[in-house]
């Protein structure tokens, strides 16, 4: 079992309906086929319940973020969430990676373009953790589900903190890929990949 000591979280196949994805699904054990079919839908917002104070636009923002995260070929469509001046930071399990090059490097180490691993995210809810004149921090409760080609589906639980910069009138800038994500900070229940928790639909 791999651990995330060198940042090796959950990796994944591209979310699509092409023949490569279909072939990968057909190689899964028969018992997993219904679950795999559901997971191909990618980011699952069905469980999402925002707490008081969470901007309505955060739902679209977080969904767009994880759609880019789940795309093994995504580069600028992922890094464009952070500021163009390289002041943005991605934090995974306590390790900080500043700037677009480091952020993309981590993404590609977790989800290599070679595509031996797929991951999906269930977004359970969100709350406001902090707010200043300059930014607003949302924390999303997520489930990360991972499947390796030829392997089983397992999952981990996480809290994802999105620190989003504000505009001139003091509103959080929640347009996806607009350079507004100052910090993304993910804490997870385990850094093992795969985990010992079988995937479920919730």
Image (spheres, grey):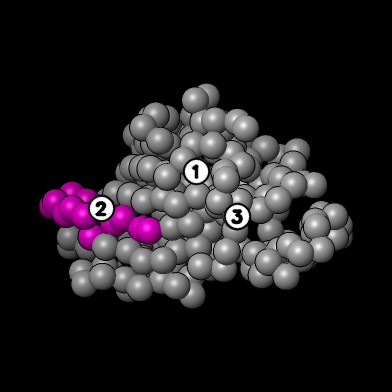
What are the residue bounds of the magenta stretch?
128-141
Q: Pointer 1: what residue?
A: 79
Mark 3 lies on residue: 198
Main secondary structure of the magenta stretch: strand
Q: Quadrant of the N terminus?
A: top right
Give the secondary structure at mark 1: helix
- Element marked by disc 2: strand
Point out the residue furthest to the left here.
133
Question: How far apart are labels 1 and 2 at the CA level?
Answer: 19 Å
Q: Is residue 92 left or right of residue 37?
A: left
Residue ID for mark 2 = 137
Separation (CA) of disc 1 from disc 3: 31 Å
- Image location of residue 187, percent across then percent down: 38, 43
Residue in view at x 67 percent, y 37 percent: 112
Q: What number of labels is visible?
A: 3
Q: Earlier in the sequence, mark 1 or mark 3?
A: 1
| SS of the residue under disc 3 | loop
Label 2 vs label 3, nearer the camera: 3
Answer whether residue 117 is visible to the viewer in this image.
Answer: yes
In the rendered image, residue 133 lying in the magenta stretch gets the answer yes
Q: Residue furthest top?
A: 6
* Tag 2 near tag 3, CB within 8 Å: no
Question: Where is residue 118 shown, x and y percent of the image?
Answer: 67, 50
Whichever of labels 1 and 2 marks the residue nearer the N terminus, that label is 1
């Amino acid at each position: 079992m791999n651990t995330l000591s060198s940042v090796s979280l959950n990796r994944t196949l591209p979310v699509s309906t092409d023949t490569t994805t279909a072939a990968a699904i057909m190689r899964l054990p028969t018992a997993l086929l219904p679950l795999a079919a559901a997971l191909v839908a990618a980011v699952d917002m069905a469980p999402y319940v925002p707490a008081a104070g969470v901007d309505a636009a955060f739902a679209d923002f977080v969904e767009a973020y994880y759609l880019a995260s789940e795309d093994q070929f995504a580069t600028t469509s992922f890094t464009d969430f952070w500021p163009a001046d390289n002041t943005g930071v991605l934090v995974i399990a306590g390790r900080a990676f500043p700037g677009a090059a480091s952020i993309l490097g981590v993404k590609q180490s977790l989800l290599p373009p070679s595509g031996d691993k797929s991951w999906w995210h269930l977004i359970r809810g969100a709350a406001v953790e902090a707010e200043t004149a300059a930014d607003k921090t949302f924390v999303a409760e997520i489930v990360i589900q991972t499947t390796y080609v030829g392997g089983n589906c397992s999952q981990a639980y996480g809290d994802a903190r999105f620190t989003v910069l504000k505009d001139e009138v003091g509103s959080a800038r929640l347009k996806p890929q607009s350079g507004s994500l100052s910090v993304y900070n993910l804490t997870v229940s385990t850094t093992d990949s795969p985990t010992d928790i079988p995937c479920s639909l919730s």
